Image (spheres, grey):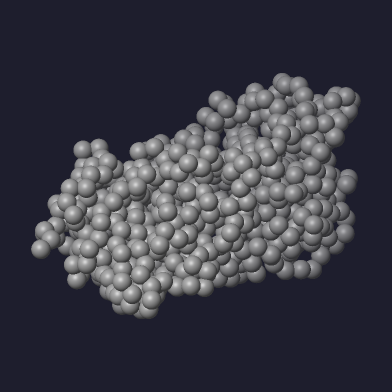
Amino acid sequence: MKKILLYTLLLWGAIFTFGSCDVDIPEIEKPVLPEKDSSSQPDDEDDPSADPNGIFDYSKIGEHPRLFLNAQDFDHLKQEITNNSILKIIHEIIINRCNKEFVGASTLTYQKSGKRLLTVSRKALERICHLAYGYRMNNDYTYLNQAEKDIRSVCSFPDWNPTHYLDIGEMALAVAIGLDWLYNDLQPETRKMAQTALENYAFKTATDPTYSKQFIETTTNWNQVCNGGLLAAALVTYEKDKSRAVEIIEQSFNSNKTKGMTTYGTDGNYPEGYMYWGYGTTYQVILIAALEKVFNTDNGLSQTTAGFLKTAEYMLFMAGTTGKCFNYSDCTEPEEPKLPMWWFAKKQGNSSLLFNELRLLKKGAYASKFEERRLLPIIMGFIDSEQVKGTISAPQKKLWWGDGDTPVVLIHTDWTYSDTDKYFGMKGGRSNTSHGHMDGATFVYDAYGERWAMDLGMQEYAPLEAAGIDLWNSSQSSTRWSIFRLNNFSHNVITINNNQYHYQGKAFVRTDYMKAIGTKLGAKFECFGVNRNGNDYDVDAPVRTAEFIDNGGDLELVIKDEIKSRANKTPLVRWAMATPATAEIISNHCIKLSQNGKILYLTVQEQNNHPFTLKTWPASTDNKYDEANPGVTMVGFEAQMSAKDTRVFTTTFAKEPKNIN
């Protein structure tokens, strides 16, 4: 490759120390570059061997840039952003961040938080991805200088923390994007540093079972993130060591195909929930999109499981009507942009998948902080500019459900995001799934512009780990289940005898009910073994049914719980729900909930008029490691059952209290 003559080896030799964590790269004026071809030319150190045989046709690997956007794509994009308002808005968000946050930013340093380097990896990815995009689009050398500084900094680290491999997955992608998108304009020494670091810190550890066991055989987001970053890096460095690159590409492909992709099941619901869908599926799309751009095929990867191409619709339904998601498992509550939706919309030719994304873009959410915004520039290669020029229609379906490890039923009553649009989500599953909680048949409910039934969501990991909580052990006796937000006492579920849920019990969606539901809006779950005490069962599997009932044009949520006690068992039933509203017990059957000038009544009835007691509980404990939940109250009731008894409790959520005879 023709070298950029302005830079000198002497300058870099003076400042380059591979083992250092801090690299001071001087700012340089925009050079007058010698004329050169726009295509990348082979370096003296390129691998001269023949392209290996393998899963893909490696002779198709072309010039840099080759990840997500090639040179022609960047040129086309420069024209498109002047004609397309959506592309222009996102482009300006990216450039504004380059100018305000990344140019002149402090040197990236090797600083772990507990066992993780992940914050640094993500910061590097955010900077390099944005700056490399900015330079390709604007030819602003301040972006190139800063990106090069950041690449050299992280490539000078002593390692990328292989004991927590997510850190490597994200760092490998960061360096790969910088190396690829800036290839011809990086100093040769920087390219060499990047290639060496990717080999030593990423590829060597990825083929060492000591470290690769963290992700190779898993079916969680770890598989998607680690394999996605590694595969992208191997595609970028292919010409330097072809056999090594092919080894990494095919290892990542096979691992992802046989393990990572299985997480989507047959229906597309993601066991780890809303937040980790954003993380794992972003990297899943990155992996597939990288293959498609380079080889013009993913070799069937996106078709591996029936659920993958259905998963975007699942995510569409995971957003409520109040700016909050259905945040089951380890997840925060706010609704956020989901970058893979742009890829799915283009892939499937379905613009309605962007209904929430365009709403969030209009609200300014894409310009605000959100989980995956470090990767925002990549979606510029995913957006179908023609698809987003017109009005995007609302989804036609009102109910979505999926079976599998963590079954869910999700309902939007009209997609207007107004007071008439009600949202309901209910989930099943087990506690011992990745990031799972003790929450079988829990639910959330939005109505009249407010969230009434909520999930407290996740608690930050590092403080719990520092407090000695065995956070990643999901067995029955694990201290994970002493955390209030994670156990059943904080969730909207039935609890028997105040016992902790059993970690192997599972709430199943009743597929017979769902398949026969027709136009009705409802859900039905059956909880097997959830409420057992060891091998001792006080009740048979409780059944929970939720349906919307039309009351004079206003849809009211009705939840029915059927519980059967066993012989010689007299269980205490606790029905509880977390709410941000102020709660007032106004009768033996009714609780009044109030928030932001809105009122909702919970009216409870037992079909044979057996007694129960309405109650409220604090949403807190005395444990020092439990985070506070200000403004949240647990509401519900308790009932004492006799042996071999059946109780059916009906709870109605309505604007007016129901008359109970």
Which residue appears at 68% of the width and 29% of the height? 146
How many labels were placed on the picture?
0
Provide residue 48's location: percent of width, then percent of height. Answer: 88, 55
Provide residue 195's location: percent of width, then percent of height. Answer: 80, 45
Which residue appears at 67% of the width and 25% of the height? 106
Q: In the visual, does 54 lie left or right of 269? A: right
Provide residue 437's location: percent of width, then percent of height. Answer: 49, 57
Q: Quadrant of the N terminus?
A: top right
Q: Is residue 111 above or below residue 335?
A: above
Q: In the visual, does 75 lie left or right of 609? A: right
Q: Is residue 312 above or below residue 140?
A: below
Q: In the visual, does 561 lie left or right of 240? A: left
Asked whether residue 621 appears in the rendered view, the answer is yes
Q: In the visual, does 34 lie left or right of 598? A: right
Which residue appears at 84% of the width and 25% of the height? 15
Q: Nearer the viewer, residue 277 or 537?
A: 537
Which residue appears at 18% of the width and 67% of the height? 609
Q: Quadrant of the C terminus?
A: bottom left
Q: Residue furthest front?
A: 568
Residue 552: image quadrant is: bottom left
Provide residue 504's location: percent of width, then percent of height. Answer: 53, 68
Asked whether residue 176 appears in the rendered view, the answer is no
Q: Nearer the viewer, residue 439 or 58?
A: 439
